[in-house]
Amino acid sequence: MKKIKINKLDEEVYFEKLDNGLEVYLFNKESFKSSYVTFTTKYGSVYNEFIPIGSNKMTSFPKGIAHFLEHKVFAVKDGPDPMEFFSRSGAICNAYTTFDNTTYLFYATSKLKENICYLLDYVQELYLTEDSVENEKNIISEEIHMYDDRPSEVLAEKIRLNTLNTNPYRDSIIGTTSDINDITKEDLETCYKTFYHPSNMFLVVVGSFDVEEIMTAIKDNQNNKKFDVLDEIKIKEIKEKNEVYKKEEIIESTTSVPKVSLTIKLPIKNTKLSRRELSLYLYILFTSMFDETSSFDEELKKDKIINNTTYVSTLNTNTHMLISIINETPKYKEFIKRVEDKLKDISINEEDFKRKKKVLISNEIFAYEYAEQINDIILDDILYNGEVEEDPIGVIENLKLDVLNDLINKLDSKNISKIILKSGE
């Protein structure tokens, strides 16, 4: 078992890669009263075209299938289902699907070893019937309709649809009703066999526990199971044009107050920055320009154009970074004009740059007081960097203003997609 020391934070992560390829990360902190455990496959909604196990042909699968499979993994043939099992010990379980991964999780205050073994068992055994697959289609279709009635969800979907052209990040994680109806039992089994192999998954345990005892329990659980050898998973390469798909769209919605977004599309192919560095630089830049401490926020509130602080959202799609500036206001035309004027002179001074770095360092230190946040940090590190970041504070400290200014020069403030959601009345 390898011990990974987190510099400047006096914290440690224990790591071991098991014989079947499963990666296990353990974070022990005696002060924690509860544990937070995640079991993740590197399989999300964007992986719809790949070469399945046992095939040599690139195959396309219906959109939304990763999320559909997440639902079906909760089904068990015999014994208590996950909800019932975890509730017996006062634990809470859940799961979620993103663009890049599917994660199964639980919170627990007792019986950590038993709960971990059960988590591994139910996720690593798929039970499907034709009838259960057909019944699930109705459940997920209702979920889709529910999202369609939420203006914030509609806006988020439209941002990606109008900014991206062919990149699979443009599509809904959950899929459309048409997509869902195309999914078959065989499709689900193929995706499960390809992506739910231990060598494509990792387990993160954060809490107060005996590290050796928990690692031994996990090894024993995995040694009692047999898995085929998995070759490298081949996924279709993502290609995307630099131009936004649609410059502007006004959408009728149920929102009581118009919602508006302006999204910049930044190519990252030739960016030499790491994924973490790029996100940090853009966070520093755009929050300093638009958050509650900015002159922009102060002026627009003074002029009664906005009541709420402008929200900045970023999404890395592996080909482009999408930077969205979002707010809600009846005076959306004035808001758009003021944002566009601000984007004509994208800049940051040294004082704001240093202040934002201090905030990021403080947030990083503070995060290690919470089991869920530590788990999320480790999970993101593995998904996007392939390993735990040993010096997260150092990464922030080493951010340079001249590097950020060089990044600013690459931003095309004219390559923007604007969306307005407003009532149809």
Image (cartoon, grey):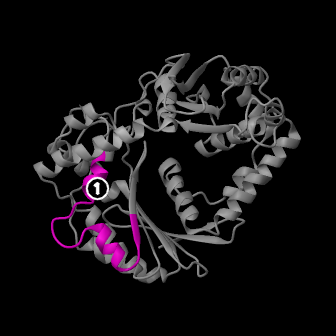
- Residue at 72% across, 21% down: 334
List x then y, in percent, for residue 102.
38, 51
Callout 1 crowding tier (Cα within 10 Å): few <14, some 14–19, many ≥20? some
Q: Is residue 252 visible?
A: yes
List x then y, in percent, for residue 162.
49, 22
For this rendering, which residue is in front, 403 or 156? 156
- Residue at 66% across, 58% down: 391
For this rendering, which residue is in front, 17 or 132? 132
Within the magenta stretch, is there residue 301? no
- Callout 1 amino acid: His
Q: Residue farthest to the right?
A: 351
For this rendering, which residue is in front, 221 or 107? 107
List x then y, in percent, for residue 296.
80, 32
For this rendering, which residue is in front, 183 or 38? 183
- Which residues are drawn in magenta? 68-93
Q: Is disc 1 placed on a helix, strand or loop?
A: loop
Compared with 48, 419 (above or below) is above
Residue 165 lies left or right of residue 410; in this view the side is left
| Residue 377 quadrant | bottom right
Compared with 169, 19 (above or below) is below
- Residue under label 1, please give it: 197
| Residue 46 quadrant | top left
Residue 279 lies left or right of residue 127; in this view the side is right
Compared with 388, 330 (above or below) is above
Compared with 236, 365 (above or below) is below
Within the magenta stretch, is there residue 91? yes
- Residue at 38% across, 57% down: 95
| Residue 198 quadrant | bottom left
List x then y, in percent, for residue 261.
60, 28
